[in-house]
Image (spheres, rainbow, N blue to C red):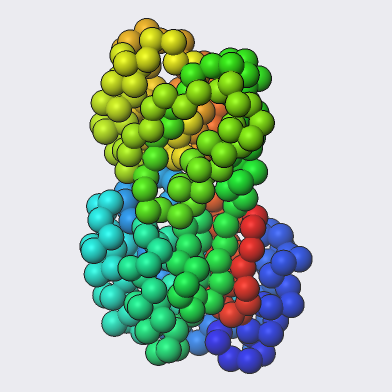
Amino acid sequence: MKITTLRGFIASTVMATSIAGATTATAEGIMCEPGETYIMNVMVSGHPYWVPVYQGFKQAAAAFGCDTVFSGTPDYDITKQIASFEQDLIKSPAGILLHPMQSDPFIEPINRAIADGTEVVTFAADSPNSNRTAYITSDNLAEAKFAAEEIVAQVGDSAEYAVLENPGQSNHDLRVTALIDYMEANYPNMKLVGRQATNQDSNAAYRATASIIQANPNIAAIWIPEAGSAEGAVAAKLEAKSDILIMHADVTPTTLEHIRAKQHPYGAEPEPGCAGFHGFHGGASGQPGGAL
C-alpha cells in the first residue's frame, strides 16, 4: 500500500470520501501488498471507547486488503504503553495509529519508528514535538465550550463546579483547562471548588466525587473529560442522593444507560469511528491530519 500510486490515491480522496464510499473504493493496482499490516496502539485497552475506533480503522484497511492488529496495554501506565509500542515496531508494520498516554515520552519512539519507515498517526491525544505523520482529533475547545454553556444553562451563571482530570494526556488536559478558562472569561461568578485527578479510573472517580460533594454541599456541576471516570462519578452522585449535574466527554455502554435512566443529561461524544477511519488513511497516505 505504501507504493506511490496508492499513497497518491488515498491522499486525493481521504478528505472527500465517506466511510461507506471508501469501502467500495478499491481498485486493481492500489491494494496492500500481502502481509502489509497496520496497528492501532492504545492504553487502557479494555476500555469500550476503543471498540468503534478500531472498527473504523479496520473498515478503512479492509477496503484495500490491509491487515490490522489491535495492540497496547490494559493499564494506565506510560512505561507499559511505550513497551507495547516497541513490541509493535519489532513486527515492522506499515503504520501505527497511536493514542499516546503522554506526549513527551513518545517523542523518541515515534521519531525512531518514522526513521525506520513506519508511519505513525496520533489520534485524540498527541505528541506534537515528535515527527508523527499526522494528528487526528476532535475539537476539544469546542467540546469544552459546549459543556460550559450547557452547565450554565442548567445551573445558572453563579454556581459552584468541579472538574476531574487525567494530567498529562493532551486532549483531556485541553478539555479541562479550556472549560475553566471559558468559565473565567465568560461567567466569572462560576466558582471552581474542586479539581482532582482520577486517571480514567472509575473507582478513583467515585471516591473523588464523593469527597467533592461532601466538602461542597452547594456544588452544582462537575465536568469530566472522559466517560470512564464519569461512571464512578454517577455512582457517587446516586449514593449521596445529590442533584449535582454531571457533564462528560465520550460515552461508554454504562454512561449511555445512565443517560437513558436520566441519571445525568448527556455526554459530548466525538465520532470515534471516524477517528479510526481517518487515522488509517493518514498513515497510509502520509498526509497531515486535522480536526474531525
Front residue (pair 105, 20): 105
Furthest residue in direction top, as rendered: 241
Q: Quadrant of residue 56?
A: bottom right
Quadrant, the N terminus: bottom right
In percent of the image, x 37 and y 84: which residue is there?
Answer: 112
Front residue (pair 57, 35): 57
Q: Is residue 205 left or right of residue 287?
A: left
Front residue (pair 97, 161): 161
Q: Position of residue 136 (x, y in %)?
A: 57, 62
Q: Is residue 256 left or right of residue 154?
A: left
Q: Position of residue 202 (x, y in %)?
A: 31, 33
Q: Quadrant of residue 153?
A: top right
Position above or below: 142 against 67: above
In percent of the image, x 33 and y 39: which residue is there?
Answer: 197
In percent of the image, x 39 and y 27: which residue is there?
Answer: 194
Count of numbered marks: 0
Quadrant, the C terminus: bottom right
Q: Is residue 17 left or right of residue 272?
A: right
In percent of the image, x 48 and y 62: which residue is there?
Answer: 126
For the question of whether residue 252 can be seen, the reply is no
Q: Quadrant of residue 19?
A: bottom right
Position above or below: 292 against 185: below
Q: Position of residue 164 (x, y in %)?
A: 39, 34
Position above or below: 237 against 55: above
Position above or below: 268 against 64: above
For the question of whether residue 218 can be seen, the reply is yes
Q: Position of residue 148 (x, y in %)?
A: 60, 31
